[in-house]
Image (tube, rainbow, N blue to C red):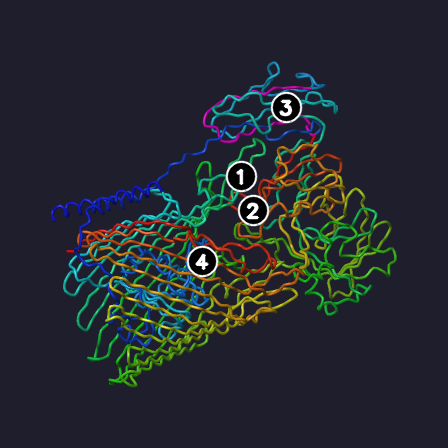
Amino acid sequence: MKKFKTYQTAIFLLLVGLVTISCSDDDTSETLSDPFVVAFENLSANLNDIDDSQEINLVFSETTSEGGTMTLLLESTNAVYGEDFTTNPISEETTITLPLSQGSNNTNFTFTKLNTSLDETVEIKFSIISVDYPNSQIQGNTTFTLNSSASLGRGFEPNVGGPNQPNQVYIDLSTETQTEVRRDSWDLGFYGGNEFRVAINGSIYMAAAQLEETNIDAISEADVSDLQAQVAVGTFDPANEAYIDHPDGTITKTALEAVSAIEAENKVYLVNLGYEVGTENPAPGSVAVAGEARGWKKIRVLQQDNGYLLQYADLNDTSHNEVFIQKNTAYNFTFFSFDSNNTLSVEPEAENWDLNFTVFTNILEGAGSYGFSDGVLHNRKGGVSVYAVSTEDIAYDAFQLADVNPSSFELDQRAIGSTWRDVINDDKVLVDTIFYVIQDPNGNQYKLKFTALLNDSGERGYPEFKYNLLQ
Amino acid sequence: MRHFSLVIFSLCPFLCFAQVGQKNDTIKPESLDEVIVTGQLNPQSVSKSVVEVKVISRSDIDRQAGNTLADVLNTTLNLNITPNTATGKSGVSLFGLDSQYFKVLIDNIPIINEEGVGNNTDLSLINLDDIERIEIVEGAMGVQYGANAVSGIINIITKKSSRNDWDITAYVQEETVGDEYEWFDKGRHIQSLKVGHNFSENFYANATYTRNDFGGFYDNKQGENYALNDGLRGHEWLPKLQQNTKVVFAYEKEKFNIFYRFDYLNERIEKYNETVSLNENPSTGTTNPSALDELYTNNRFYHHLNSTGTFFERVGYNISVSYQEQTKDLERYTYRIKTRQKENIEEGEYQQRSAFFSRGTFSNSINSEKANLQIGYEITNEKGSGSSLAIVLNPDSDEVTQKLNNYDFFAASEIQVTERFSLRPGFRASFSNLFNTQYTGSLSALQQLSNDWELRAILGSANRTPNYNELYTYFVDVNHDVQGNPDLKPENGVSAFFHIKKKSTLANNTIRLKNKLSFNYLGLNDRIELIVVNQSPLSFQYNNIDRFTALGVFSENEVFYKNFKAQLGGSVQGVSKVLDSQTQSNDDFLFNVQLNSNLAYSLPDWNTTFSVFFKHIGTQQQFVEKTNAEGEQEFVQGETAAYSWMDATIHKSFFDGAFTTTLGCRNLFDVTEVNTTAFEGGTHNGPPTQVPLGYGRSYFLKLTYNLTL
């Protein structure tokens, strides 16, 4: 029996030992190590945009833990170093050496124009030829070109403004510019092209219904109260498609009929002014795009002197305001706000934008109008067209000019739309397997891929994309 | 797996040293005087109980090496365990009703969780190391146990005494999860230590600590540090670590017993997002992958003070006072996969419940041999809150809080009409600050016939209180209008059971039989469903509208022959739902067949018991709305495929019971998921989706050391 006692004690100690060591954690795998990369922040800049001098930025893939150096090769066409332009630090022979300082994320050098009249034949190109830093690799934006052509592409973070998505952001790819406008700053757009058409602001979920009346002063709230519940976005009634501008962007499919030259044919419209930009702070991943309801107006639009005469009033008013709005052919629309009772600048000129990041009113098949966040609409009226490519067919990096299929380009301004993200489930995800080919009004063709939907903390309304000129 | 073989190998010396024939570790036939408490006026034997009570004994639990309630119930007839791989919780489904309708009690009082007091229990949070037996009652028990005891209850009876001066039990249990096993990161690792001591003749105390580390089920997934965005990051089943400390102090004297029990549970669930943001830097062409991960921490505190005894020589009392709370916290952060750093850490409360609870019963208060009257009260002061991350709320509000105070009075009487016929009427009135006064009633009858026949008829009722989603959901934006309804009233449930039981012996008493045939009905009125309250603009709201009926017949049989014990059961249950919430619906009964069997064979000379636990769940049907070929919505039968569970174990003790080992295999049929078409939406002949049920065939080894002095 004594033997068993000893044995028991031994086993008991073993058990206690197991209990004790089980409380630690094993961590066998090691941290992944990636190469260190230095690259130009952007691929190109336009010489004409540089008045005097400009800093050219280089970014690192990670913060440096020690110092190092890198060397750039300088090649110029129809321009002479020291006469037409110079750099700081200066070039020795045809190379520029830059220090990589410890604890840093980026470096830069300065390009200075000496000759203010460099013509469009001039091209100055910098290439990274060596990086003296442990485990470094040359990849990404290895060159930077200064010329007078369209942008070669870059990464972009349109300032949509977070989960309330307060801004519409117009992007011009060839000039790398973005123009921000607050979504609820405008109400109506008066078409600048041949047709006499008026658009409503779909980014704040406006809706409009034609009434039988032609006398705007004869309409009161009592006449339209039955209609009001229907003239709205998101009622899940397919009939409500009649009250919105068709989301494909066709100018002849606006909620308001064409403005007739015959005054008596222009009816009064009941207009739901949609919602202010939301102010709530939603759970991460969600959006709160619609705030307070903006109320109602009655309007009537007539033709006048190659322009529009807008009559508008609150529903129960017995008199109305009148504003004349001139057609401006340089723009898709001339925009008007009931808040300021005036026209205002919203879109850049028709040829100077390609994409609009905006909340928009879409149509769900069988369910009518439906509000969409994270929308990207292309400038159909300005001549932009787009098509989507699946990375299962060809990788973004592999896609070349020769791969462009001209017959695939779509006019529907929702060709990008919301196809780049999936927000049905609790997890709001970027669609990784899609990119787009875009043809701008000047015939430049770009490939474009989205790289982020959320910011680092998982909040919506922080899109990022990259694009490259196909050449 | 390599490590696991090692463990088994290290066990070999035990097997060699095993000594033969010290103590009979046979399957004890369930003695006739097995005492139960659930639903009783006074503790009494199973056969005298008017209510039909099923018992899972300590030895049943040990044979299955069950650590939590979720481990032991999956082969119980009628009851299905429903794991939720998205939350890591395990619920229960009984007679087609989910965990909201089922109440879990410990020593006669409901155990709290972050979503309910007694109901909505996560079975994997109920540790079994200090318990004596589990009592199960099917059917509505509203009179005895209050709201939400609709489909049935489980009452867990803890151990509060010992015959020994000292009891020390330590065990380790190593399990594979499917075929996944590593010393730390994979598999399931349980360690436990229990110490019990009799300080004096009257005063007993014990303390238990258990650590249960579940590494999660990876299947094809790659865990936390996987950096690609192809849906493979994270786990199929979430890893979790539970630590449970329990203490009981018990004082017993002839007419006065008191105990205090304390239970602290800490659980940490790791949820690694399968979506990886690559965070590509378009300039350098490099990535810095990150993921939005979540850690859930549960803390449960349970205090229970109970006193039983008699006063005035004959009035028995049983008074419990309890305070419990459970808080589930959520930590969300951005995980930088390459550098393994957490950023943007946000911590906050996810869901919380706390409750003051008191229940008292007084019996034998009328002076009669023929009748026994029990009167009782139950007070629940419950406070709960849910954050906007747990419940969809108006973005203006961060959380919803609710106070629910119930003051219940109940009375039950047991009338011995004749020596063989007894009646049990019962009634409860429940007054609360949120709902109208609720009344529940029950009536049971037991007729004992000659030749060991027993007939029981049991009528019961119970309500289910609306949950926070049903009351407080607020999802209103331009496109949606879905709202909870603060004016909801509780759902009403009624059940009726009829049991015929017969005990017999055959072949000169060498074969003993217990047979039972049962018929059941369970009906629910005012069922809460989300319905369309306006077509244009479309809006939804929760309302009391639908009806639910379950009808069935089941049989449970036991055979004892020498060292062999077999239990065999079968059940056919039909469920009909009258969906007034839908424009079209189908209230035909849909039937589900279940079979179960537990076999045990013991070799007393070897102190060894071989056991097999089996359950088959037949094809389950459900009416769901689908789109047909013409593009119209129609109600069709969706189907969830049949599946079977089987566990097999060998339980052996050594050195006079000082060591016991249990070696076994769970889920022998290697079930991971089954196909189902029983989900709303999609087309009529669309592809099925999968319901996750298990993590495949797993092996375990439990080594227990018992020291008694």
* Depicted B435 relative to depicted A271: above or below: below
Q: Name the secondary structure under disc 1.
A: loop
Q: Are marks 1 and 2 in contact (CB under 8 Å)?
A: no
SS at mark 3 in the image: strand
Same chain assignment for discs 4 and 2? no
Label 3 – label 2 distance at C-alpha: 40 Å
Q: Main secondary structure of the magenta part?
A: strand
Disc 1 versus disc 2: distance between alpha carbons?
A: 12 Å
Report, in whole angstroms, how far the alpha carbon at label 3 lies from the one at label 1.
33 Å
Q: Is residue A248 left or right of residue B385?
A: right
Dot 2: within a 10 Å radius of its alpha carbon, few (fewer than 14), some, or many (20 or more) residues? many
For residue B444, which quarter of the picture? bottom left
Report the magenta residues as a range.
A49-76
The amino acid on which the numbered mark 2 sits, given as a three-letter code, is Val
Q: Residues within 10 Å of mark 4 (few under 14, many from 20)?
A: some
Instruction: Determine whether label 3 and label 1 are within 8 Å by CB.
Output: no
- Dot 1, how many residues are within 10 Å of its Cα: few (below 14), some (14-19), or many (20+)? many
Is disc 2 on the same chain as disc 1? Answer: no
Look at mark 2 in the image and give the residue it sits on. Answer: A429
Circle 3 residue: A111
Which chain's residue wears label 2?
A
Residue for badge 4: B643
Is residue B402 left or right of A381 when viewed as pictured?
A: left
CA gap between label 4 and label 1 equals 40 Å
